[in-house]
Amino acid sequence: MNYDRLKDKLAILADAAKYDVSCSSSGGNRKNHNKGLGDSSVSGICHSYTEDGRCVSLLKILFTNHCIYDCAYCTSRRSHDTPRAAFTVEEVVDLTMQFYRRNYIEGLFLSSGIFKSPDYTMERLVRVAKELRTIHKFNGYIHLKTIPGASDELMQEAGLYADRLSVNMEIPTKSGLALLAPEKNHDDMKAPMKTVQEQIVVFKESRKQHKHAPKYTPAGQSTQFIVGATKETDLQIIRLSSHFYKQYDLKRVYYSGYVPMLTDSRLPAIGTPVPMVRENRLYQADWLMRFYGFEAEEILPSDSPFLDLDCDPKLAWAIRHRQHFPVNIQTAPYKMIVRIPGIGTRTAKKIVTARKFTTLTLDHLKQMGAAVNRAKYFIALRGRNEHLVHLTQDNFRQYILAQTQTKFKDERHGQLTLF
């Protein structure tokens, strides 16, 4: 094996993979000093976070950045003058095993441009996962990007070897996709999601009858939206996310603020700020739908379809719906307690348990982990709460934003180091 050529391919295909954030990556920039072992900064290693908060390292690469499509927002589009490369199946398998044995990584995140045809590309991605599992007995994490247009048979086989499958929806609206990627359509992207969803159900039923039946993509499936490349509204994005959670049983929807790096009259100009705050607010709204019982239409009204960038979506909802407050934490149901700004799901559960034994105070809430600087304006206590006087004031929004200003605001300007 020509390791110099392999290193060149790794540099090209790891760099091309960095714009896909759907494995929750963040920077790995360890350098090799003093003749030490390994160097993660040039080898495509990124970090992903598990549901319980553990940080794991993944080899994050494209199989190839050759592509038959010409999507305006993509660095791998066929008209883009950029160095091209493609791994072989054996090279990706060997890289994964070598990195894993050196304890650089705990898994593989493999995406790809599309060369020749969707089936031709998908077949190679599946072969990578299959060889790792069956020949090398690799039990680390594998996340495969699935290729829209690939056959159902390949999708069914992919889920037998990968922990997670995902299809990027990319541009949230049909009109936006038609503008920037006229060769694609959302129906082709939804088709593999539907196949994966159906197979998950089939294999779950099989395991009820046969306990040794194989698992099918046990970490579920996910998707990603690019935010800010077109003129979509936040309400359109949130509604679409809600649709995918309900209709396709997705584990996660990721939101990626568009990074202007290509010159095209259809795109924001190079130098346009990345919509980082908007991206963060969308993740917060997503959290409200998944864990706090909010519907998409509750988070944003149709006549005001963009999220408030000055405050988080739950606080914005509470300010718009002051008629629901104050909430009596001694008697209110759990579903209302989690809607109080500054109180998360864990704290809400502690409140429901603790109030059986004592009369709660603001000090109690602080000890339980509540952000009392926000919560105190929305809760009723057994005793007097002097902060409630502000709840009915006309300038309540301005007052509460002034009182809850984050001390980190000045540090949030500019693009964070993501890769």
Image (tube, grey):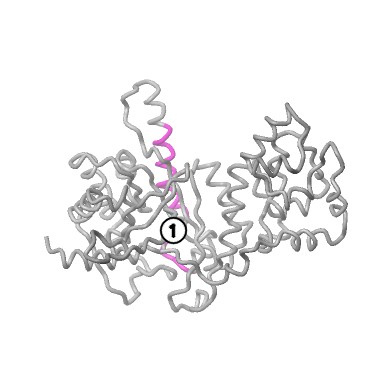
Residue type at numbered disc 1: Val
Q: How many marks?
A: 1
Residue numbers of the magenta segment:
180-201
Image coords of residue 18 (percent x, y): 38, 63
User: Residue 418 lies in what quarter of the image?
Assistant: bottom left
- In the rendered structure, does residue 181 fall within the stretch colored magenta? yes
Residue shown at 84% from the left, 62% from the top? 395
Q: Is residue 90 left or right of residue 224?
A: left
Foreground pick, 292 / 341:
341
Question: In the structure shown, which secondary structural element does the residue marked by tag 1 occupy?
Answer: loop
Q: Is residue 74 left or right of residue 160?
A: right
Residue shown at 26% from the left, 70% from the top? 84
Q: Is residue 167 left or right of residue 134?
A: right
Foreground pick, 252 / 106:
106
Image coords of residue 7 (percent x, y): 21, 65
Instruction: Report the predominant secondary structure element of the magenta stretch.
Output: helix
Q: Quadrant of the C terminus?
A: bottom left
Residue denoted by label 1: 21
Q: Quadrant of the N terminus?
A: bottom left
Instruction: Look at the picture and state if 86 lies above or below 371.
Output: below
Q: Is residue 250 left or right of residue 81?
A: right
